Image (spheres, grey):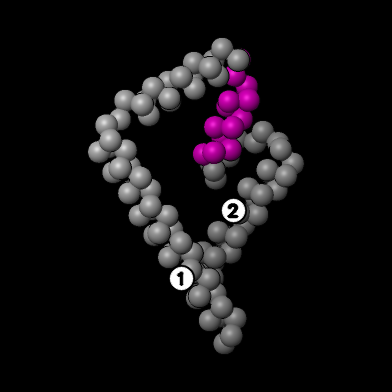
């Protein structure tokens, strides 16, 4: 468990340092960093086209689909926070031993 926590900490530390230095590293650690560097290299026309594509995709959803996607996002957030709380609790328990 300690190894997993340290690996998770290292990944977060790496992401933070990359964001601070604003370098354009291509990492498998975070898809958002890849997407950001990909969009930075786009021409303005390409960016506009990409933005329209995503807006159209979102506007084509029915109200039921929108509610379902919001519910699934909320479930995902709840699961992630409970997992992080569990990891932190285990780490504190190990430190107190």
Q: Using the image as rendered, state which of residue 62 and residue 5 is in the foreground.
A: 62
**Which residue was labeled with disc 2?**
11
Q: Mark 2 against mark 1, which lies toward the viewer?
A: 1
- From this view, report whether residue 57 is shown above or below residue 65: above
Quadrant for residue 10, please give it.
bottom right
Q: Residues within 10 Å of mark 2 (few under 14, many from 20)?
A: some
Residue at (52% x, 39% y) in the render = 31
Q: Secondary structure at mark 2?
A: helix
Residue 37 shown in magenta: yes
Pick the quarter of the image with the C terminus.
bottom right
Is residue 53 toward the left or the right of residue 38 in the image?
left
- From this view, report whether residue 65 is shown above or below residue 7: above
Give the CA separation, mark 2 to mark 1: 18 Å
- From this view, report whether residue 19 is shown above or below residue 47: below
Total label count? 2
Question: Which residues, given as a range, are shown in magenta?
Answer: 31-43
Residue at (68% x, 43% y) in the render = 19
Q: Main secondary structure of the magenta part?
A: helix
What is the x, y in percent for residue 34? 56, 34
**Which residue was labeled with disc 1?**
86
């Amino acid at each position: 468990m300690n190894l997993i926590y340290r690996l998770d900490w290292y990944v977060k530390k790496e992401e933070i340092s990359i964001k601070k230095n604003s370098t354009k590293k291509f990492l498998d650690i975070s898809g958002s960093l890849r997407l950001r560097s990909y969009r930075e290299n786009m021409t303005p026309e390409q960016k506009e086209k990409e933005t329209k594509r995503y807006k159209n995709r979102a506007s084509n959803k029915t109200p039921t689909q929108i509610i379902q996607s919001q519910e699934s996002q909320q479930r995902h957030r709840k699961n992630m926070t409970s997992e992080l709380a569990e990891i932190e609790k285990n780490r504190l328990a190990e430190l107190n031993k």
